[in-house]
Image (spheres, rainbow, N blue to C red):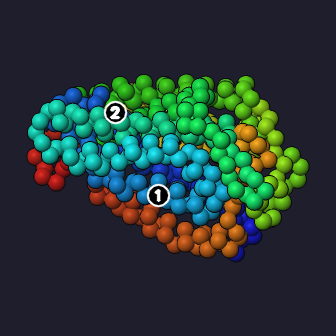
Amino acid sequence: MFDYEVLRLIWWALLGVLLIGFALTDGYDLGVAALLPWVAKSDAERRMVINTVGPTWEGNQVWFILGGGAIFAAWPFVYAVSFSGFYLAMFVVLAALILRPVGFKYRSKKPDPAWRTRWDYALFIGGFVPALVFGVAVGNVLAGAPFRLDGDLRAFYEGSFLALFSPFTLLCGLLSVAMLVLHGAAWITMKVEHGPVYDRARRFGSLASLLSVLLFAAGGAYVALGDLGYRIVGAVDPLAASNPLRTTTEAAGGSWLANYSAYPWMLAAPALGFLGALLALVGIRRGSEAMSFTGSSASAAGIIATVGLSMFPFILPSSIDPHSSLTVWNASSSAKTLGIMVIVTVIFLPIVLGYTAWAFKVMFGRVTTQEATTNPDFY
């Protein structure tokens, strides 16, 4: 079996894979929901849009559950601090996500237009709010969370819900929204018949692709010119037992860019973020659904990978006590736990991937307005 250092690296990479998997699957569900009131005007059009994600949205949430489970099992310190410190933000996300299944199930139960319109906007909230808050959360991770650890490794969070929304974190939130709206628009163009909804999705997708590029560039400039960043001072033992207080860390503006100088290959991640969004724009303009969806997927993967690679080896730095910062080397579970989890992952992750691929193959095809209004199995 792998040594402790390699196991920590494997689980750091797997956490990134799970987050990217969530963005690529459930991300377009969020994007479609956020676009619902704007790309579809009539009841038939909105039912068509809803049913582009109807068969797969529940399965896509598996990636969200897997991500939370991986944090809990592989990075218990990170789980304890983030899920307790960001409790209200998590509650807002969960409340918004609950609107999705309720909206899907109840929207078409009554023929009343006002009833259906209210549920359409509930679905919009269920897509827009999580997309925004997830981005805000990533912004707070980059900026550092206001927590500290005492001598017994008890975590104390000293922030507030409103403090989560700073100019930089809101920029990250808007980037997240633009990224997922682009992904959702690309999905809609691939799944609906050609017509008004298709054309509106292309317009919104074009706008979202440009905003993704601009906001991603603005975020990079903020990181480069601002005071964001942390670094480890002194030697690090990647084989040592987890104890965040044994690591000496300090805040250092611009440190999030240091890895790109040390490891130039990491520049592939931000390049993918930019080029993917531009590829999606070209695909949307040319009417190539495969190109636009490939581009939106690549952009989301590149943007998320950029965050992880920029911060490595940090996972959750502390803004009020840098010495309490959590890294790949000081916040993981034991080597035995990580090793058992690798075996479980090797067995079950291919099953999840295989089932997901099979489900998408079975559900492949465009949804029409006629089918959406006549098929009794549709939402």
- Which residue is painted at 63% across and 39% down in the image? 159
Q: Which residue is mark 1?
A: 65
Q: Nearer the viewer, residue 270 or 27?
A: 27
Mark on residue 35? 2
Q: Nearer the viewer, residue 218 or 261?
A: 218
Residue 200: quarter of image = top left
Q: Element at badge 1?
A: helix
The local crowd at label 2, few if under 14, some if 14 to 19, many if 20 or more residues have their Cα within 10 Å, is many
Residue 76 location, x and y as percent? 63, 60
Q: Nearer the viewer, residue 357 or 204?
A: 204
- Amino acid carrying mark 2 in the image: Leu
Q: Nearer the viewer, residue 116 or 154?
A: 154
Q: CA distance from mark 2 to mark 1?
A: 24 Å
Residue 44 location, x and y as percent? 16, 36
Question: Which of pointers 2 and 1 lies earlier in the amino acid sequence?
Answer: 2
Extreme residue in the right direction: 234
The local crowd at label 1, few if under 14, some if 14 to 19, many if 20 or more residues have their Cα within 10 Å, is few
Position above or below: 16 against 202: below
* Pair 2/1: label in front: 1
- Which residue is painted at 76% across and 40% down in the image? 230
- Amino acid carrying mark 1 in the image: Ile
Position above or below: 73 against 22: below
Residue 322 location, x and y as percent? 77, 43
